[in-house]
Image (cartoon, rainbow, N blue to C red):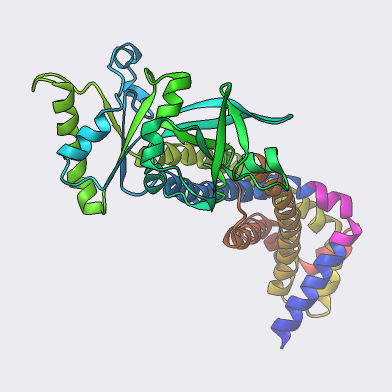
Amino acid sequence: MRIVNSFLEGFRIALRALKINKIRSTLTALCIIIGITMVTIVDAVTTGMDISFEKSMAMMGQNVVYVEKWPWGMGGEYKWWEYRNRQEMQLDYVEKIRDYSRYAENVTASANRGTSVRYQEKSAEGVGLSGTTANYLEIQGLNISQGRMFVDQEVRSGSKVAVIGNTLMESLFEFETPLGKQIRVGGQKFTIVGVLEKQGKFLGLEDTDNRIIIPVSAYGQIFGLRYGLQIGVQFPNQEAFKEGEYELEGIMRRIRQLDATEDNDFALNKPEAFKQQLEGMKAGIYTVGFILSGLSLLIGGIGVMNIMFVSVRERTKEIGIRKAVGAKAWEILTQFLLEAIAICLLGGIIGVALAGGLTVLINQAFVAVMNVSVVILAFSICTMVGVIFGFIPAYRAAKSDPIESLRFE
């Protein structure tokens, strides 16, 4: 019972000391606040990136390889002049890959660009336009919420039909039903036949619902298909994906009529390339964030140690009186350790509260999700900092001579 009572008494004394010296305690905890805020924000951003990545990869389809002129994330192998001279993809590659491949389940073509879309007096800017084949939604893992997707016959005939995303529907139609309405794209009228299910942002940045999909043939009539065509090849499972990737490379070399000694003049791009870029970005955020957080916590800990030495000196007579009435050395040690921990926890509470507000703001522009485990970690760090940097002043107080302490003026 004495141990419990000593802890409770030490905690009450610590709180009373903080209450008496509010400004000093807050200023002492300032670097702790900064450090805890940064630790929490770094974890919130990286956690948000992980969650967003999984959703974004689902938008690109499962077990899909994209055949294009340009590789994704060229990095150190970037040879712009070589890639620039490569042949463009051709629409007839779709049929050839379907005929030659034993593993491919779906093969589609798409061309993409930004455009503006008008409906009566309303317009939407920066809309993502995709000209695709009829099976495009199957590869992308997209679903229709209203209406339907256009069919092969409409693609072959170059019909002016369109499927739009949720954001574009809200921008142009508000409370109207978009199905059957005519919109203008590239100066041409298109009839809306379907609306996509809401998808969200790609990697927390691009609004994938601000889009419109039209037949690739209609796209070619307006913008041409000489540049930027992408061939998507989907395989039924992971095993077929591994075999099919090598097969697809051979098929493309055959289509391009490349000799055995010639390098590929095309790129096989996989969504996994984004994962490598994401890991590099996360590593950079972690490194910078934790270095700055560590420095802030170190400076904050030194500040706590300094203020605890001041506190011990100011309360030397109080220490002498407590020892004179029977307080043990460990009780004095506990009292000042609890005070140091309380200062750090004060910084932790304010830091987590600030991080919560900043997480909400960051999530409006990028992605950030606060994790409960990191809040627990933040308070654990505060406790550890309080113990480490408060121990020496507390130990000095515990070992002080009671007679000398009572004489102190």
User: At which x and y percent is residue 370?
Assistant: 62, 55
**Residue at 65 percent of width and 39 percent of height:** 365
Residues 46 and 85: in front is 85
Residue 394, quarter of the rendered image: bottom right
User: At which x and y percent is residue 204?
Assistant: 56, 42
- Position of residue 261 relative to residue 11, above or below, is above
Where does the magenta region start and end? 18-27
**Drawn side of residue 229 relative to residue 379, left or right:** left
Single out the residue that lies furthest toward the bottom: 1
Quadrant where the image shows the C terminus: bottom right
Residues 201 and 3: in front is 201
- Position of residue 368 relative to residue 99, above or below, is below
User: At which x and y percent is residue 173?
Assistant: 69, 41
Q: Could you tell me what secondary structure mostly forms the magenta stretch? A: helix
Residue 208 visible, this orientation? no
Residues 47 and 374: in front is 47
**Residue at 71 percent of width and 82 percent of height:** 4
- Position of residue 136 relative to residue 158, above or below, is below
Residues 338 and 291: in front is 291
**Residue 25 shown in magenta:** yes
Q: How many marks?
A: 0
Quadrant where the image shows the N terminus: bottom right
